[in-house]
Image (cartoon, grey):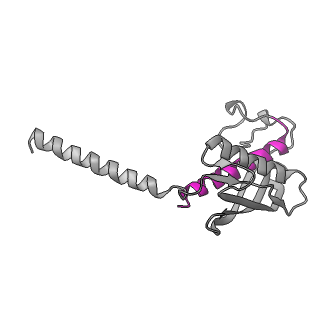
Amino acid sequence: MSLKGLNIYLSMMIAFLFNCCAFYSMSGSIPPHIKSISIPLIENETAEFGIAEEITDGIQKKFNDEGILKLIDKNADSILKGSIKKITDGPYTYNKQESVSEYRFKVDVYFEWYDNRNEKTLFKGSFSGWGAYGLGGDISNDGIDNDGDGKIDSDDDNEFGEPREYASKVAIQKISEDIINDIMTTW
């Protein structure tokens, strides 16, 4: 093949790949008429005090950070309603002496994203998130990967605070990220 023929072939392949990728990325977008979302306080079906506010705030913050949809209180194009179904907080790993070395705080929630204009459910599903913690008061040197990022203690610059509270924040962050990802890939 000549150099000119090779250049034409490569140009055609690049154009083909660009068009395929552009088509693919368009297929995963939010319906065009949905520009805003309302996220009211989620229901709490558990005895865990304050968790509904924390999860609602976490999801709202994630929407604000990502800038995907405008977050408004009333007359939004869509609404995200949810309920906390279950909180699990218990032993997760044991040491050689059969004592608990790590606890896991897990939150199970159910969410439904509803299109107010077309009066139909866009998606609904269950989500869960967890965080790990030990009994020591300082998670920055507990030897546990508290947020599941593969780093522990001095190698992880964001592990600090009260252990159970931190585990709760990690669980909420994971749920928020999963919801955003599902909304972005629904369509």
Residue sitting nearer the eye, 91 or 24: 24
Q: In x, y percent, where is residue 29? A: 51, 55
- Mainly helix, strand or loop, the magenta region? helix
Occupied quadrant, residue 84? bottom right
User: Is residue 161 left or right of 39 when viewed as pictured?
Assistant: right
Residue sitting nearer the eye, 134 or 179: 179
Residue at horizontal 44 percent and vertical 52 percent from the top: 25
Residue 168 colored magenta? yes
User: Is residue 122 left or right of 5 when viewed as pictured?
Assistant: right
Q: In x, y percent, where is residue 16? A: 28, 51
Residue at horizontal 11 percent and vertical 40 percent from the top: 4
User: Is residue 72 left or right of 99 when viewed as pictured?
Assistant: left
Residue sitting nearer the eye, 115 or 147: 115
Query: Can you see residue 95?
Result: no
- The residue lying furthest to the bottom in this view is 120
Query: Can you see residue 166?
Result: yes
Residue 151 colored magenta? no
Q: In x, y percent, where is residue 150? A: 64, 42
Rendered position, 153 above or below 183: above
Magenta highlight range: 161-187
Q: In x, y percent, where is residue 75? A: 71, 56
